[in-house]
Amino acid sequence: MSHAPTRRPKVVNVISRLNIGGISPYVIPLTGLLRERGLDSRLVAGSVGEREGDMSYLAAQAGVDVLSVPSLGRDISPLRDMATVRRLYRLFRRERPDVVHTHTAKAGFAGRIAAWLARTPAIFHTYHGHVFHGYFGPAKTRFYLALEQFCGALSTRVLTVSDNLKRELGGVYHVARPEKVEVLIPGYDLSQLLPIQRGASDFREQFGIPNDAPLVGIVGRLVPIKNHALFLEAAARTRQAIPGARFAIIGDGELRPAVEAQSAALGLGECVHFTGWVRDLPGIYGALDALALCSKNEGLPSSVIEALVTGVPVVATAVGGVVDMLAGGLGALTTPGDADALADALIGVLRDSAARTRAEAGRAAAFALYDIQPAAARAEAFYRRFCA
């Protein structure tokens, strides 16, 4: 007696846009790997802004076809976004997914409403960070929080990327009942980073940085939440203690002119190097002596993951998921907004000959936790809980 083939569970991940940084390097390969693991996996995304940088090339490399809903890429505007909700609703009615999993605020708002209207059996949203601190004024923050609480009621589960963020979302901001909030740690393709050794790149030569100069880098978009102003203030203080130190600002964004002006005003001159976007991640981390993260708010920043896997010492502000990432002495945590504390920590790392040895010792464990392969296995197991 023949049996009809078992239907593969269909999972649709929805992201606002495939911009550089953020979670594009997670959801794109995840979509392909879930397909390899037996799920019918799809990806929906909006358009990328002019100065954000586009990572859609990763989808082509992974053989992932992206279903385009261009209006997902704009800022949230509830009235205007009803058209986006309708577009997603029609898509979900056509595709009939078992799971809709949204990422980022705009996709989470429009995607969860559309999935609920389409009667999708399981609706998830991941907070890879949140916008309830450090982004907006009080009125706008209350507005976004009310939207998130409304959408949290529509969600089967609300996910986040660390225990500290879980506590904030469930216990402080109440975006959903605490029992509905779970941790699902994402991952990235780190295979090219694990073998990297100190000095194994031409990054310094490319940007005119002496081989013997202590080099601190900050990697990410030049936007207010990343607080490059704090980085430059700490750089000026660090330079006073270690005159030969150099600083690399790796990335681009709307604040670049202002950051360049501040660097000049602080008299940092040739010791600060603006590289723009650099695709050669191994080259970056092979050149750095320390990574700084100065954010006012964070989720699970990819730059910290990349530093942990390459054995680069990390100095970071104690915000969001970074608190959990650097627990147990994996990096130095400083008070947000405190330039003196950040500078003291950077000086300490650059002068401590054992800092690199300690960072090297944690590389394998970081790879095992944050690589895309174990992350895909975690995601598959989570989805199958709701597709039985």
Image (tube, rainbow, N blue to C red):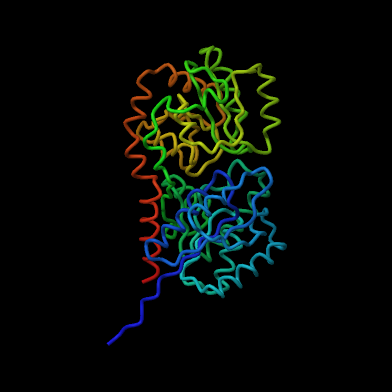
> For the image shown, how many numbered marks are present on the structure?
0
Report the residue that reaches farthest toward the bottom: 1
User: Residue 313 appears in which quarter of the rendering?
Assistant: top left
Q: Is residue 95 above or below residue 376?
A: below
Report the residue that reaches farthest toward the left: 1
Image location (x, y in percent) of residue 132:
58, 47
Q: Is residue 195 above or below residue 32?
A: above
User: Residue 331 appears in which quarter of the rendering?
Assistant: top left
Looking at the rendered image, the quarter that the N terminus falls into is bottom left
Q: Is residue 219 above or below residue 36?
A: above
178, 370: nearer the viewer: 370
User: Residue 180 appears in which quarter of the rendering?
Assistant: bottom left
Q: What residue is shown at x 62% (from left), y 18% (from top)? A: 270
Image location (x, y in percent) of residue 294:
54, 32
Q: What residue is shown at x 64% (from left), y 66% (from top)? A: 85
Image location (x, y in percent) of residue 63:
49, 57
Q: What residue is shown at x 43% (from left), y 21% (from top)? A: 349
Looking at the rendered image, the quarter that the C terminus falls into is bottom left
